[in-house]
Image: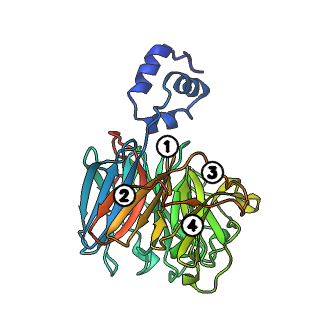
C-alpha cells in the first residue's frame, strides 16, 4: 500500500497497527485518505457490542449506577458516586462505555466529570466561564458522540433565566492533547431557550431538546460544524403558555429520537411513543411506534432511554422504586398514526428487574463496557 509520496506500508502491517488502536481513533483515521478508509472498513470491522441497562438513582449526597445483564436482567455491577459539593450527583449521559456525571449543589457549585467505571479513570472538565453569568452551571446537560469524527462533546443548554437565549455551550474532548474549552454556539434556531420538563437526549450524533413553548424540537449536530436546526414535534404536542403544562419528554427509542406523550384516562395512563422517521428542519417526519397503557397511574415509562433491545422499560413509585422490562415483538400494531390500534398493556408480562427501598430520581441509560482510555481534556 503506497500513498502519493511513495511511502509504502504492507496492508497486513497497517492492519495490525489499526487493530491496536481504540475504536474511536480508527474512526478518525478513516478520514485520512481512501486507502486508510478501505483498510479500516475491510480489515478492522467494529465489534458489535451488546449494551446493558444502566439505572441511575440520584439521591442526596450519594447516587448509584446499577448495571443489569441484557439476557437475564440480573444485577451485575454497581457503583456509588458521592457528592463533593454537598449536592446531588446526576448522570448526564453515556457514550461507548464512558459516563458523564454532574455534581451540583443548590447554589453555583458544580463539577462535571467524564469517567470509565471499568478502568476507574476519571477526569474533571473545566467549569463554564464565569463570564456567562451566575447561572452558567444550571440548565440541561448532554453527553454526545459523533460517529464520523469520533469526538465526544458535552453540551450545556443554559437556564431559562440566562442572559442569552440564542446560545448553547459546547465542550469538545480531544485526543490530540489540546486544552478543552467551552465555546458558545449561537443560532436563531435556539431562540426560546428550553423546557426543562421535556428533558434532553443524545441520539446518533445529535442532541435534542424542546423549546420553552414545548412545541418545537431543537437539534444540535455534535459534528464539526455544530449545526443547529429546529422543527415541529409530533402530533399531540402543542404550544404551552406555562412550563408545567408540558408533560411530554424526548427519549431514545431503538437508537432513534423519540417523544413520549402521556395521557391520563380515568385511573389509567396511556402513553403514545412517536419516533423521528427522517430529516430535520421543516422536513421532519414522525410516526407512532407504540401506544402503551397501564392501569396504575403510578407507573411511567423511563427516560432518556425507553427501550433496550426488544424490551420497553418502565418504573413505578407505588411500592419503593421498581424497574420493569416488558418484551415487545417488533413495533406492534401501532406504526404510523393508527390511533385505533389496541394499546400494549405494560403490566402484561412485565418483569421486575430492580426493587429498591431508597428514594431519589431514577433514570435509565444504555451502557457497554469498554477499556478504552478516556479522551484528553488537556490543560
Q: Are marks 1 and 3 in contact (CB under 8 Å)?
A: no
Which numbered dot is residue 150? 1
**Residue at image mark 4:** 209
**Residue at image mark 2:** 55
Is residue 112 visible in this depiction of the protein? Answer: no
**Mark 3: few/some/many CA within 10 Å (<14, 14-19, 20+):** some
Front position in the image: 170 or 313: 313
Quadrant of the image for the N terminus?
A: top right
Secondary element under disc 3, as helix, strand or loop, is: loop
- Comes first in the chain, label 2 or label 1: 2
Distance from the alpha carbon under mark 2 to that under mark 1 = 26 Å
Q: Quadrant of residue 65?
A: bottom left
Distance from the alpha carbon under mark 1 to that under mark 4 = 23 Å
Which numbered dot is residue 332? 3
- Comes first in the chain, label 1 or label 3: 1
- Comes first in the chain, label 2 or label 3: 2
Amino acid at each position: 500500500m503506497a500513498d502519493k509520496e511513495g511511502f509504502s506500508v504492507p496492508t497486513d502491517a497497517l492492519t495490525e497497527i489499526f487493530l491496536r488502536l481504540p475504536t474511536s481513533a480508527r474512526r478518525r483515521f478513516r478520514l485520512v485518505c481512501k486507502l486508510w478508509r478501505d483498510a479500516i472498513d475491510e480489515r478492522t470491522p467494529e465489534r458489535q457490542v451488546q449494551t446493558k441497562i444502566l439505572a441511575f438513582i440520584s439521591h442526596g449526597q450519594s447516587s448509584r449506577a446499577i448495571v443489569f445483564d441484557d439476557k437475564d436482567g440480573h444485577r451485575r455491577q454497581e457503583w456509588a458516586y458521592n457528592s463533593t459539593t454537598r449536592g446531588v450527583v446526576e448522570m448526564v449521559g453515556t457514550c461507548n462505555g464512558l459516563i458523564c456525571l454532574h455534581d451540583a449543589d443548590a447554589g453555583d457549585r458544580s463539577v462535571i466529570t467524564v469517567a470509565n467505571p471499568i478502568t476507574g479513570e476519571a477526569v474533571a472538565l473545566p467549569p463554564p466561564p464565569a463570564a456567562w453569568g451566575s447561572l452558567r452551571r444550571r440548565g440541561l446537560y448532554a453527553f454526545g458522540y459523533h460517529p464520523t469524527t469520533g469526538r465526544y462533546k458535552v453540551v450545556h443548554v443554559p437556564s431559562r433565566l440566562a442572559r442569552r437565549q440564542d446560545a448553547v455551550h459546547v465542550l469538545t474532548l480531544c485526543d490530540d492533547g489540546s486544552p478543552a474549552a467551552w465555546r458558545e454556539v449561537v443560532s436563531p434556531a435556539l431562540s426560546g431557550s428550553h423546557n426543562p420538563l421535556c428533558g434532553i437526549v443524545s441520539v446518533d450524533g445529535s442532541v435534542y431538546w424542546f423549546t420553552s413553548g414545548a412545541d418545537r424540537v431543537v437539534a444540535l449536530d455534535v459534528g464539526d460544524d455544530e449545526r443547529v436546526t429546529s422543527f415541529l414535534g409530533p402530533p399531540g404536542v402543542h404550544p404551552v403558555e406555562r412550563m408545567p403544562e408540558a408533560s411530554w419528554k424526548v427519549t431514545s427509542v431503538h437508537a432513534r429520537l423519540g417523544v413520549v406523550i402521556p395521557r391520563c384516562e380515568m385511573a389509567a395512563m396511556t402513553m403514545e411513543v412517536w419516533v423521528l422517521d427522517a430529516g430535520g428542519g421543516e422536513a421532519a417526519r414522525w410516526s407512532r411506534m407504540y401506544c402503551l397503557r397501564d392501569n396504575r397511574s403510578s407507573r411511567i415509562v423511563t427516560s432518556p432511554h425507553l427501550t433496550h433491545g426488544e424490551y420497553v422499560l418502565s418504573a413505578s413509585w407505588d411500592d419503593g422504586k421498581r424497574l420493569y422490562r416488558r418484551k415487545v415483538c417488533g413495533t406492534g400494531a401501532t406504526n404510523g398514526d393508527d390511533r385505533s390500534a389496541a394499546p400494549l398493556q405494560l403490566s402484561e408480562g412485565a418483569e421486575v428487574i430492580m426493587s429498591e427501598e431508597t428514594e431519589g430520581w431514577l433514570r435509565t441509560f444504555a451502557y457497554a463496557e469498554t477499556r478504552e482510555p478516556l479522551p484528553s481534556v488537556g490543560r
